[in-house]
Image (tube, coloured by chain):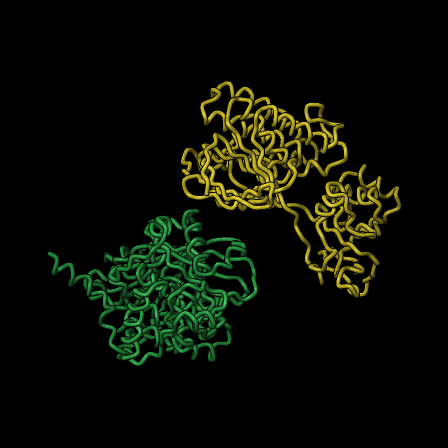
Chain colours: A yellow, B green
């Protein structure tokens, strides 16, 4: 078991983690960023669509290009990037054990002793349970998106998508671009959840959007994989109405039922949590510097509440700057100036019908931190 | 809300659940108070066996055997399945000195009528095809003295069966105070977030937390938390066919037996006692160790590493099997390694059933029965005066 020191360990090389590592490294910190995947970039590398938002937030750029840019910036700033590296635990005394897969396929257990930790582990997909939901061919919409956009593998020929949020809409379109037939998009609510512009694109391509419907069963074919989806109309309590069932032939069912923050490591670090419906589940309490209730443990991105890549980038920047403050690499007042500017940008992102609710919630959560944790931070 | 109960049991781990079950079944209107949820403390952070061969000859073994027999009775009686699974146990002796010491132990237990026997390398390798081939032998205990249960489900089973008989179970219950009679010092009531419960009898089954309850009635209960850790493997084909322990386990459990094992400094410092079992869910549970860390139940990477190292020495095949998680808990440790199952002279109506260290699951059925017998003023199944709380007062008196 080898032991290694570092100023900052960033866990998760998505937009939040990468931007945290860039900020901290630029301020002079020795930064290691780890990610369990073969490629860094988190979800950015599968986002081949153009972003919305202001020019400060790369509007018009595609996620994949933003990912490449961040990766170059991280390398230029001297960040050490460990891929195929899984954090297996955060132990007393801020010891972080990492299983690193080496080029020859063997793995090595490294225990890292970082001064500061930034946890940016993102979010994972929710599932909807119906009969036979564990059959091969039923998958998260995000998983299907990774298959087509990152690994260039089609998940199947004919897809039924459940959920009409932006993920459901965009992935449906991208599945068609990849050559899949999308048989239907099924949504339990009486209206489409995501942006009209995305919905219009798939309607124009001839995909029926079946509102007030749900999937009640995956039909299993002779080979043991999905051969169809039984859908049904739902009543005002989202309960299927008997007698309205209909079977659609398909070999893939994708579920776009929202995301929840990935909390495993945050819990292991001992951070105080709170449950928050707006942000998708349990999230860590943190202050405006993105520091949690445990001293020297920072969080950023979807693991602090499910939002989007741009908010993740900015939260990451704040966390990186704050880690540098803890290390004494930048004065508190200089840092505040930078962080205030980022907060202003974040506020501008959290506008509109979806954003305003998130801004209000984020403010509430930071207030909650100051009420409950105050200066009584725990030591890891 | 004010309520009246014949008996109030505090703590819904294996011991408290069993005590509550036995009392309710005997006709006492009983309340079970738990500060978190059923099986949320030591009883869900342990392994899952009851053995006689990890007990010292005498009352320790006698209680173990009585409890193991009783598990069989309860498994038939209960509607709630707690995965009762008798399986033989092998105590691995790495070297001849360990084998000799185990042989001596085996002879003593045989003399008391407990069936166990020594096996040598060849037979051991037949019984356990994946075990290291260079071990000296083992102490084998048949199914009659070795049983596995699911510890969570055991607690749920006791509570479920007791509720059927009319038990009131209060989870997330904060005990604010225990009021005693000003003249007699006898138990009168318990003040909780659910209101005031009037009672003449309280049984403190709070395990490592029993001393906190003791403080509420002004007594000192000498129980300390002793931490243990288990690793959980991915699901695998069956790798071991018995409950497996190393004889060095005895050493770490009873400081009085002093073998020096040829182990690495890490294994030594972590006080590792290898044990292995194959669960009904097809995972392996790999333990374990005993350390004093206060109430800190965070798992330590050094412990995980040391357990893995020791485990691979006995089962080289484990090298190819992934560990998916680890968990740690605290056992209620008493210096003389005997639980406290007793009334308390200075506080009439206050009883203690705690301090079972690593034997809480194993001893839970018989402990429940003993407490019922104590409260009914019946003679206990056998003499348990060694478990009396007064033994600590006597020692203090001698010391002063």
Residue at position x 34%, y 54% in the image: B271
Q: Position of residue A234 (x, y in %)?
A: 76, 57
Please, is residue B98 above or below residue A55 in the view? below
Say whether residue A232 is visible. Answer: no
Q: Is residue B297 left or right of residue A254?
A: left
Q: Position of residue A351 (x, y in %)?
A: 67, 31
**Screen quadrant of the C terminus of chain A:** top left
B19, A46: nearer the viewer: A46
Q: Position of residue A241 (x, y in %)?
A: 77, 62
Q: Is residue A271 left or right of residue B32?
A: right
Residue at position x 46%, y 77% in the image: B75
Please, is residue A58 above or below residue B252 in the view? above
Q: Position of residue A152 (x, y in %)?
A: 77, 43
B66, B343: nearer the viewer: B66
Q: Is residue A201 left or right of residue A62?
A: right
B142, B165: nearer the viewer: B142
Say whether residue A360 is visible. Answer: yes
Name the image quarter holding residue A57.
top right
B2, A183: nearer the viewer: A183
Please, is residue A175 above or below residue B11 in the view? above
Count the marks: how many? 0
Please, is residue A79 above or below residue A380 in the view? above
Name the image quarter holding residue A379.
top left
Residue at position x 45%, y 62% in the image: B132
Residue at position x 77%, y 50% in the image: A155
Name the image quarter holding residue B207.
bottom left
């Amino acid at each position: 078991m080898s032991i290694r020191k570092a100023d900052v360990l960033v866990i998760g090389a998505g937009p939040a983690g990468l931007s945290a590592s860039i900020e901290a490294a630029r301020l002079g910190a020795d930064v290691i960023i780890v990610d369990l995947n073969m490629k860094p970039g988190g979800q950015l590398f599968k986002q081949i669509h153009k972003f919305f938002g202001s020019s400060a937030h790369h509007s018009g750029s595609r996620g994949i290009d933003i990912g490449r840019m961040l990766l170059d910036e991280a390398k230029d700033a001297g960040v050490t990037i460990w891929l195929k590296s899984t954090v297996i635990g955060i132990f007393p005394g801020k010891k972080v054990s990492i299983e690193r897969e080496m080029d020859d396929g063997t793995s090595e257990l490294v225990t890292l002793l970082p001064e500061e930790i930034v946890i940016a582990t993102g979010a994972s997909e929710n599932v909807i349970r119906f009969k036979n939901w564990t059959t091969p061919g039923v998958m998260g919409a995000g998983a299907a998106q990774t298959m087509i956009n990152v690994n260039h593998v089609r998940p199947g020929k004919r897809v039924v998508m459940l959920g009409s949020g932006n993920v459901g809409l965009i992935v449906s379109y991208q599945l068609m671009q990849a050559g899949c037939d999308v048989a239907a998009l099924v949504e339990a609510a009486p209206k489409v959840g995501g942006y009209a512009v995305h919905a219009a694109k798939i309607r124009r391509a001839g995909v029926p959007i079946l509102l007030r419907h749900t999937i009640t069963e995956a039909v299993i074919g002779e080979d043991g994989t999905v051969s169809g989806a039984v859908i049904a109309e739902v009543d005002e309590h989202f309960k299927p109405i008997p007698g309205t069932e209909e079977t659609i032939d398909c070999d893939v069912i994708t579920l776009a039922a929202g995301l929840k923050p990935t909390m495993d490591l945050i819990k292991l670090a001992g951070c105080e949590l709170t449950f928050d419906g707006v942000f998708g589940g349990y999230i860590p309490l943190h202050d405006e510097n993105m520091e949690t209730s445990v001293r020297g443990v920072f969080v950023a991105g979807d693991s602090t509440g499910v939002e989007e890549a741009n908010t993740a980038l900015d939260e990451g920047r704040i966390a990186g700057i704050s880690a540098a403050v803890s290390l004494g690499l930048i004065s508190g007042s200089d840092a505040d100036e930078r962080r205030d500017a980022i907060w202003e940008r974040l506020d501008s992102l959290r506008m509109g019908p979806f954003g305003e609710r998130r801004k209000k919630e984020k403010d509430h959560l930071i207030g909650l931190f100051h009420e409950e944790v105050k200066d009584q931070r725990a030591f890891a | 809300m004010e309520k009246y109960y014949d008996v109030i049991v505090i703590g819904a781990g294996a011991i408290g659940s069993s005590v509550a079950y036995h009392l309710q079944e005997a006709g006492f209107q009983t309340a079970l108070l738990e500060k978190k949820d059923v099986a949320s403390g030591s009883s869900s952070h342990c392994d899952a066996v009851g053995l006689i061969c990890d007990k010292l000859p005498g009352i320790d073994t006698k209680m173990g055997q009585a409890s193991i027999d009783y598990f069989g009775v309860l498994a038939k009686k209960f509607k709630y399945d707690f995965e009762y699974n008798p399986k033989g146990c092998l105590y691995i002796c790495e070297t001849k000195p360990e084998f000799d010491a185990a042989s001596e132990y085996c002879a003593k237990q045989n003399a008391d009528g407990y069936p166990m026997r020594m096996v040598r390398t060849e037979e051991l390798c037949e019984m356990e095809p994946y075990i290291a081939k260079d071990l000296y032998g083992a102490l084998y205990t048949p199914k009659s003295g070795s049983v596995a249960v699911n510890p969570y489900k055991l607690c749920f089973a006791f509570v479920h069966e007791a509720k059927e008989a009319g038990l009131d179970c209060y989870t997330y219950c904060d005990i604010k105070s225990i009021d005693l009679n000003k003249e007699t010092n006898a138990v009168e009531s318990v003040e909780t977030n659910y209101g005031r419960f009037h009672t003449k009898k309280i049984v403190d089954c709070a395990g490592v937390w029993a001393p906190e309850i003791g403080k509420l009635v002004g007594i000192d209960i000498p129980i300390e938390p002793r931490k243990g850790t288990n690793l959980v493997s991915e699901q695998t084909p069956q790798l071991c066919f018995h409950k497996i322990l190393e004889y060095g386990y005895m050493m770490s459990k009873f400081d009085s037996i002093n073998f020096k094992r040829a182990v690495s400094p890490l294994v030594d410092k972590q006080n590792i006692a290898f044990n292995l079992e194959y669960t009904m869910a097809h995972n392996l549970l790999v333990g374990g160790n005993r350390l004093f860390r206060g109430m800190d139940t965070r798992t330590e990477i050094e412990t995980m590493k040391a357990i893995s190292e020791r485990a691979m020495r006995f089962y080289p095949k484990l090298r190819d099997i992934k560990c998916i998680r680890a968990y740690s808990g605290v056992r209620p440790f008493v210096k003389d390694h005997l639980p406290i199952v007793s009334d308390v002279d200075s506080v009439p109506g206050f009883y203690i059933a705690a301090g079972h260290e690593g034997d809480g699951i194993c001893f839970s059925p018989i402990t429940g029965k003993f407490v019922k017998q104590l409260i009914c003023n019946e003679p206990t199944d056998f003499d348990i005066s060694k478990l009396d709380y007064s033994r600590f007062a006597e020692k203090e008196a001698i010391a002063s």
